[in-house]
Amino acid sequence: MNNDGGSRSQTHAVVRQSTVGGVEAAVKEAVERQATACTPPWPFPRVVAVAAALAAMLQLTGVNAIINFAPAIMAQIGQPPVTGNLMLESWFFLSTLLTIPISRVAAPRTAYIVSVVVASCCCVLTGIATAPGVGLRGTAQVVLGGGGLLAFAAAFHAGTGPYFFILAQTVFPSAQRELGASVTQMVQFAFNTAVNVLFPVVSQAISGGPSGDQNTGLSAMFFIFAGCGFVGTAAFVALTRPSRAISQPDFATDGGSSEVVSGS
């Protein structure tokens, strides 16, 4: 009986802790949404700039290029194309499950920013692994390059992909959500098309043509993707910087204040 009582107490404690985490995440999201509702309309250039930064964080980190050319990329780091592609596709599915616990502890904006930074760092690791000048071969190249790709996929599917479509609407002032979401979708589609068309062309050109070392161009592209991710993140943070100037008493907990998106 004592064991049963202890088990019930532990179960109740876990449930309470899980519930508190979910409530805190909901409060953060509600504060951000109320803040954008109270924010005056932005100038149109700022709407376009935020949309471009948000879309760049999604598409210019190279996710579609990595997915479309996964067999070739995995082959160049020492894995059979079919095996490498199967590994990535399986990992894509598993990593999407991480979205559920993340959504209970982090606001969409925070989760999006962190996931893009992680994905960009992973692009750097994969670029190092495929760079001919580094001289990685065999197990070291597979571990660094393959690990970088798997970590990139996890960051994208657990954070970047899911939260993009939330932020495409909620990050803009309420009076401009339709405009902001439309511009964001248009820009991300343009970026997506450009990356899919230009990735093999630019990669081969950097490598010196079809007869050159293709790892040279592949490595350079990963560094370019990383740079786009870091620059896009910096621009997005600057354009939607948190502000404590607007108080939200309806959502305050324990006398604390929450970060909201500034309208200045």
Image (cartoon, grey):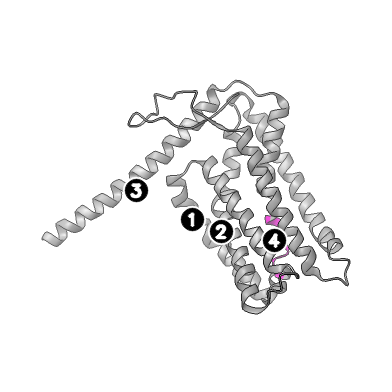
Task: Find numbered disc 2 in the image and state the secondary structure of the residue it sits on.
Answer: helix
Q: CA distance from mark 4 to mark 1?
A: 20 Å
Q: Is residue 143 visible?
A: yes
What residue lies at 17% left-to-right and 57% top-to-bottom?
6
Q: Write the start and end of the magenta stretch as one range.
A: 63-71
The answer to whether the residues at label 2 and label 1 have Cβ atoms under 8 Å apart is yes
Q: Label 4 amino acid?
A: Ile
What residue lies at 74% left-to-right and 63% top-to-bottom?
219
Question: Badge 2 local density, few (<14 within 10 Å), some, or many (20+)?
Answer: many
Q: Which residue is mark 4?
A: 66
Q: Is residue 182 visible?
A: no
Q: Which residue is mark 3?
A: 18
Task: Find numbered disc 3 in the image and state the secondary structure of the residue it sits on.
Answer: helix
Q: Left or right of 7: which side holds 142?
A: right
Q: Label 2 amino acid?
A: Ala
Q: CA distance from mark 4 to mark 2?
A: 13 Å
The answer to whether the residues at label 4 and label 2 have Cβ atoms under 8 Å apart is no
Q: Residue 17: within the magenta?
A: no
223 or 61: nearer the viewer = 223
Q: Which residue is mark 1?
A: 98
Q: Which residue is mark 2?
A: 154
What residue lies at 20% left-to-right and 58% top-to-bottom?
7
Q: Position of residue 115 (x, y in %)?
A: 56, 50
Q: CA distance from mark 2 to mark 1?
A: 8 Å
Q: In terms of image quadrants, where is residue 40?
A: top right
Label whose residue precedes the other's in the sequence (2 or 1): 1
Q: Give the vertical position of 71 relative to 245 (above or below).
A: below
13 or 165: nearer the viewer = 13
Q: Position of residue 49 (x, y in %)?
A: 70, 34
Q: Position of residue 145 (x, y in %)?
A: 64, 68
Label whose residue precedes the other's in the sequence (3 or 4): 3
192 or 74: nearer the viewer = 74
